[in-house]
Image (tube, rainbow, N blue to C red):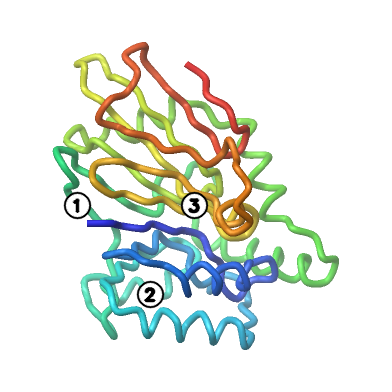
Amino acid sequence: MKRVIISDLHIGSKYSNEEALIDFLSSLECDELILAGDIIDFIKIPSFTERSAALFKILDNFDRKIVYIVGNHDASFCGLIGKSIFGVDFVREYKFRDGKRVYKVEHGDKYDTGILKYPLIVSLFSVLQDYIERWLAVDITTWWRNLLLKKRKLRRIWDIISRDKHIDVLIMGHIHTPEVLIWVNEYGKIKTYANAGDWVEHQTYIIVDKDVIRLKNWKTKKKKIPSKGDKKLDISTPSKTGLVRWSHMVGRKSV
């Protein structure tokens, strides 16, 4: 079964790349589409356009299974968790098995620390952010992500995936940082962390098919230009030297 995971579309916000999304979803072929949160940006003051309507129509006509993982920017859908509406299954997290591995997909906001743990503060900040972005044409989301990226450490990722010891592959969104990391833990078990990125700055997505995980860039695929950030990762045969990091952001491998 071929699964495609996309996250952080932020439809309705100023910097959502809805044109690229229409192009991507119109040509998408898969057995299951997993929307990993922050699909519609309700937490700001969304402004929907004809392109937004076209996106909703494409999803409505999609004839394969759609799983909608609720994120922090579309928390208005929390009341639908556990229900199926118009063929869309709303969940908090989604687990599946591919080959011999167990996968878990979630948005990732539950791992936030500091003031980001308080929804009211985040909501107030997001409304102010939306006003500034539209008034001054400044992409605060990307600036904030780059600030957090400098402070983020790999240790936190290891701590997150170690909470679910039976999970082999953890896929998230939320932090707008497309990357895949593979390592062998102290018990000799292969662990994988992947972030699907976003459709504000990166236009990235993840494919899981036949026990292989791929991080892809739609702009690269569309223009047929090779990119070091577009990697095929066979998680059934990882490096035995420990941690392997593939980052779409920097386009290089480090061991």
Amino acid type, callout 2: Phe
SS state under label 1: strand
SS state under label 3: loop
Q: Is residue 1 above or below residue 63?
A: above
Q: Residue 37: percent from the left, percent from the top?
A: 42, 62
Distance from disc 1 to disc 2, alpha carbons, whole Å, reads 22 Å
Amino acid type, callout 1: Phe
Q: Residue at x 49, y 31 (%)?
A: 246
Q: Residue 56: percent from the left, percent from the top?
A: 47, 83
The quadrant holding residue 28 is bottom left
Q: Nearer the viewer, residue 135 or 199?
A: 199
Q: Which residue is mark 3?
A: 174
Distance from disc 1 to disc 3, alpha carbons, whole Å, reads 20 Å
Answer with mark 1 or mark 2, whichever residue precedes in sequence: 2
Q: Residue 36: percent from the left, percent from the top?
A: 39, 59
Amino acid type, callout 3: His
Q: Is residue 30 above or below residue 77?
A: above
Residue at the front extreme, as displayed: 224
Residue 103 relative to residue 36: left or right: left
Q: Residue 153: percent from the left, percent from the top?
A: 52, 27
Q: Nearer the viewer, residue 232 or 83?
A: 232
The quadrant holding residue 244 is top left
Residue 92 relative to residue 46: left or right: left
Q: Residue at x 30, y 67 (%)?
A: 67
Q: Residue 159: which numbered mark, if any?
A: none
Q: Residue 96: which numbered mark, if any?
A: 1
The quadrant holding residue 18 is bottom right
Q: Residue at x 55, y 56 (%)?
A: 218
Q: Which residue is mark 2?
A: 77
